[in-house]
Amino acid sequence: MSSLSRLAIAIVCFALIFPSKSASAQRGQLIEGLFRTLAETQLERERIKRMEAEKRADGQTPTPAKDPYRVQLPSGFGTTPAFSGPGTNIRPPVDRKQLSINVRSREAAQYAENLVRFNQRFSPLVSELRSEAAAHPEIRGLLSEAYAIAADGNALLERCDGLSSLTPIVDPYRELDTRYRQFSFNLQRISGLSHQCTAAIEQCDELCGLMGAQLNIQPQYDRHALHDVMLKACTYMQALEDDLQIAVVSQHECRQLTHDLRLLRQQLVNEAGRVDQSSYDEIVDRFTEMVGQWRSFSGRVYAQNNPHLARRLDRISECGEETYHLLRIQPPISQDDLLASGHRLHQSMESVLEQLDFRSLVRLKPEEQLRVLESTRDLYHQSERFHTLCEKRGDRNQMRDVFAQIDQSWGSLSESLQQIPSLNRGTIAEIDRACQQLRSDFGIEGIHAPTSSLGNLVQAAAALEGTAEYLDEQLNRYQKSIRPSSYRDSLRGAASDLYLHSKRLHEALDTRGRLNDQRFLGKLQDEAEDLVEAWNQLSNDLEHIDGHGLSSFEASRLKSVQRQAVPYVAEIAAALLQ
């Protein structure tokens, strides 16, 4: 009991024990006043306490509980390349003096440490790619995305400061994971990168896998497109089954091939039906297993030495390559694939050599006849050596060097051979396809340098026409998704114009006029000017296609196809518009 309360009680007791007649009338008022004073004093004390507590709350800076885990940031954190590319959402930088962040759980600390290691390995990769771009021009188109990934990786790390649960960063990391995997896939398709680049890519891939597993994120891919590709391959398989029935194949062999083909086709149909329910790892495992079975089967069909069956197999192989692209994994190159391509190349070169005789060579200029004959013989012997290396499963680097010589020789010889009417054009096309496949297997971008001769211009125009037709068809297919309408109309108009002028240029070149004929050359130059104008418009529009309604894969595929046509446009422009 407080002293004030005791005093009040004592006064009351005193008044009751020693009453005064004169004060009896005021007794009630005295007691009432004492209690009123006591109550008012207590209320005032509580009011003062409350005011002091509010003042302390207003003046005190709240300090969060100390986070139990500290993650050290790399030195120079936040000094990623200045260019961050479009669409990157960079948060305000953390204090550079504070080279660590605090998190509130062990799982958050583990994730943040992996992200720190990812950023540490990716930043030097960007610098290395800038140096590599001089030797590999195709890298330049990837640098913008590299800068963006580096900046977004740092931004995501800043968001980990004070993190207790991983839930808030699942969606931001999923986007970063998807972009990096596509970037890594595109980068690994470039041959001849330095050891530093390939090592950094492998380390970043591993860290992405660890972070994705911790967040329970599966690699993202276009399931609908994968389903369509599988069904397209099934259609080609059905056509191959029909071709087998009319091919010159023994009845027993035909029956066995047809049986095995039906099993493979049904297996692929089943896989297409399970795409929506299967995880990424399940699809990759089953697809890889089926590829092994298909390679064994296709080797038996290639052994029939039937060009029509071989072309049908090539179409199915293209579906396989597109599937690898959708899943963002590199196709494994087996010795059996090299052996099949080497066998087709050697067999076709032997056929060309057998068709060359003095009667066919008279169509060439006298000074060309001996050179073509000797070059064809040399090329045949080179293809024979390459085929032998494949049969013996020799050193891969040695096989690559031998094929590089073949590719270079074929590049300078094919134009002359096409001027000989008696040569089978299908055989020459077969050599072209085999060389293209081997270039892809060995990562060779085409060694022989193009010239501005009429023959090469025809080939460039034909290739550009095919690419332009594909772009035009794809943009028509995506027209409902592309927005706004003004951008869609500009993009489709440029693609249509490019296809129209490339087709006209190809038709004009096919007339086999002479480049020293001014009227013929003037017609080509007019078409080339219109073609380049359409190309520039299309390139400008495609540069900004991200964020206009298409998925990242669809936009990336259109850009990739457009970049593949750059050498053809450059060759045409250099030859006709100088």
Image: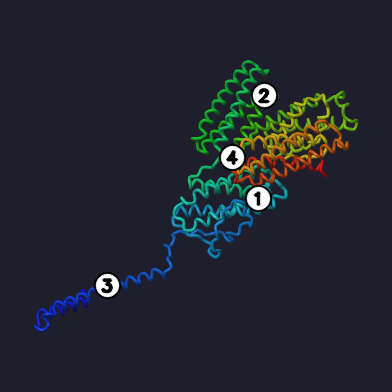
From mark 4 to mark 1, how far is it between C-alphas? 27 Å
Q: Nearer the viewer, residue 532 or 299?
A: 532
Q: Disc 1 vs disc 3: which is toward the camera? A: 3
- Residue ID for mark 1: 143
- Residue ID for mark 3: 43
Left or right: 206 in relation to 521 = left
Element at badge 4?
loop
The tag on residue 75 is none
Comes first in the chain, label 2 or label 4 = 2
Q: Disc 2 vs disc 3: which is toward the camera? A: 3
Residue type (three-letter) at the residue carrying disc 4 = Ser
Left or right: 559 in relation to 364 = left
The tag on residue 481 is 4
- Residue ID for mark 2: 309
Q: Residue furthest top?
A: 251
Q: Residues within 10 Å of mark 1 (few under 14, many from 20)?
A: many
Q: Is residue 252 above or below residue 150?
A: above
Q: Disc 4 vs disc 1: which is toward the camera? A: 4
Element at badge 1?
helix
Residue type (three-letter) at the residue carrying disc 3 = Leu
Q: Residues within 10 Å of mark 2 (few under 14, many from 20)?
A: some
